[in-house]
Image (cartoon, rainbow, N blue to C red):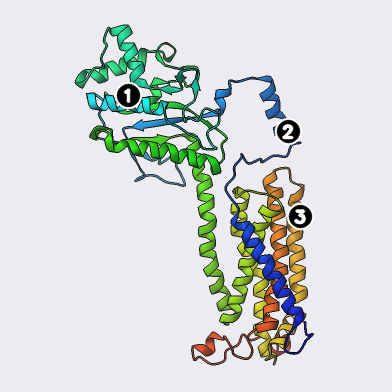
Amino acid sequence: MQLRLGPLKPVPLFFVAIMSAVAVQGAYFASRLTPPSKPEEWFPNNHMWVGISQFLGSTYYSADFEQYAETYFVWGLGEMDFGTFNEYKPDDHPATVRYDASFDLSTRAAQQAFLDTCQQLRTLRCDLPGCKGGQSSYVMQSGRSHAVSCVLEDFQRWLNATQSMSALPQGAAFVPLMERFRNEASPRDYAELPAIVAAHYHNIVGIVNGRLQHVAIKVRSNMLKMEPYGTGEKVRTLAQDFAQGLIPSMPASMKSLKVASQQFADFDLGQELVSGLFSGMAIAGPLTFVVLLLSTRNIVLALYAVISVASIVVCVLGFCKSAMDYDLGVGEAIAGIIVIGYSVDYVVHFAHTYCEAASEGHKTREARAIFTIENMGSTVFAGALTTAGSGVFMFFCLLTFFTKMALLICMTIFFSFLFSLCLFMGLCFLIGPENDFGNICCCLGTGNQVIAPAESAKDVLP
C-alpha cells in the first residue's frame, strides 16, 4: 500500500479501480432482478414432499382445469370495518363487512348491466404470459361454451323451467324468487359449464335478513393457480382494469363492482416484499449514514463508508442474478434488507479505528490507514470467518430457503470484507481525511473533539 510512483499510489489506486468496476457490474445485474416468472421451489428434488407430489399427481388424476384460478366479479360489498379489529387476536376481534347500501339488482337497468358484464367477460382477451391454455382469452373455454357462472342467466333458465316466466322479475318480487332459486336450483341443471366452474349459488348470492346484499359472477380463468407474482400481477391488473372500465357506464346501484381471487390476494405478498425491499433500503441507507457520521464524527469517512455499503448491497443482489440466476423472490427480498446490517459492520470498525489513529499521534492519511489495518485488520478478518462460518451450517438444510440464505449470508460477508478492506481502506490511503479535515466537531465550532481511545487498565485502576 505504501509503494509510490511519484505522486501516485499504484497499489491502493489499483484496488479502488478494481472494486469500483466490481460495484458497477453488481449494480447492473442487480437492476435486472425481476419478480419470479415461475413458481418458487422450496424443496430439493430428493425431498420426500416432491416424491409425494409426484405420486399423487401420477396416481390420483384430476381434471386439467383444476390447475387454473377462479375469479369473482362482485357487487354489493363496501370496505371492511376494522374498528374493533385486533391484529394480534384476529379471531377474537375480527373485521366486519360493510355492504353497499345503494346496491339494488331488482331494477331492469341493473339486471341488464349484470348480464352485459357476463357477455363482456366471455370476450375479454388476455394475451399476457400469465394467461395459459393457448386461448388468448381471460376466461377458459370448452368448445363454444365459456367457464362463466352468470347467476342471472341461470336464474332466467330456472324461471322459465319452473315458473313459466320468460323475463326477470323486478321490484319486490325479485328477492323472494331469487332466494327460492338459490335454495332449490342445482347448478348442474342450469349453469353453462357446471363441471368447469362450479356455481355454488349460496356463495355467490348473499341474502341477509331478507335483502340481497351481494352477488357475484364466477369465472374459471386461464391463469394457473400457481402463477408467480411476476406474471400473475399483470393478469390481476387486466381484470381490475376491466372492472374499473365498466363502472362509469353502470347505473348508480351497480357502482360497487370489485374483483376478488385467492391468487390475486397472494400476489400482495410478492408486491409487499418488493416494495418492502426498496422502502427498507430507502430507510436503512440514510440511517446508515447517520450512524456512521455519529460514530466517526467525520463526514468524509461517513461518505466513503456509505459508498462501500451501497456497493456491497448491489454486488450481493447482482450475484444473485449473474451467478445464480435467481429472481427477486422471498429470499432475495429478505436478504436485501439484512445485507445492509452485515455490510455496515466491518466498515464501521475500520472507520472508527481510522479516527482513533489521530489520538495516537497519526495525522497523515497513510499513517492513519496503516494504523487501522495493523490494529483492526485481523479482528475484521476473524469476524468475517466466524460470521460466514455460522452461515455454512445452513448449507446442510433440506429446505431451499435456508440453503439460499446460507449462500446469501456468506456472499454478503465475502463482499463486506472485500469492499471494506479494498475499497474503503483504498480510499482512505488515496484521499482519506487528514488532521481535522471533515471533522464535524470542528465544522460546528466545538473544537477538535476526536474520538479518544479506550483508557488502559493502569490508567483507571488504583
Of label 1 and label 3, which has the lower sequence position? 1
Question: How many neighbours does mark 2 have within 10 angstroms: few (below 14), some (14-19), or many (20 or more)?
Answer: few
Q: Amino acid at mark 2?
A: Met
In-front residue for pair 330/399: 330
Q: Quadrant of residue 350?
A: bottom right
Q: Quadrant of residue 121?
A: top left
Q: Amino acid at mark 3?
A: Val
Q: Which residue is mark 1?
A: 115
Q: Is residue 406 visible?
A: yes
Q: Which residue is mark 3?
A: 392
Q: Is residue 404 left or right of residue 232?
A: right
| Residue projecting furthest to the left | 171
Q: Is residue 271 above or below residue 220?
A: below
Q: Which residue is mark 2?
A: 48
Question: How many neighbours does mark 3 have within 10 angstroms: few (below 14), some (14-19), or many (20 or more)?
Answer: some
Q: Is residue 200 above or below residue 36?
A: above
Where residue 150 sits in the image (x, y, percent)?
A: 38, 22
Q: Quadrant of the C terminus?
A: bottom right
Where residue 91 sits in the image (x, y, percent)?
A: 45, 39
Where residue 298 sits in the image (x, y, percent)?
A: 58, 82
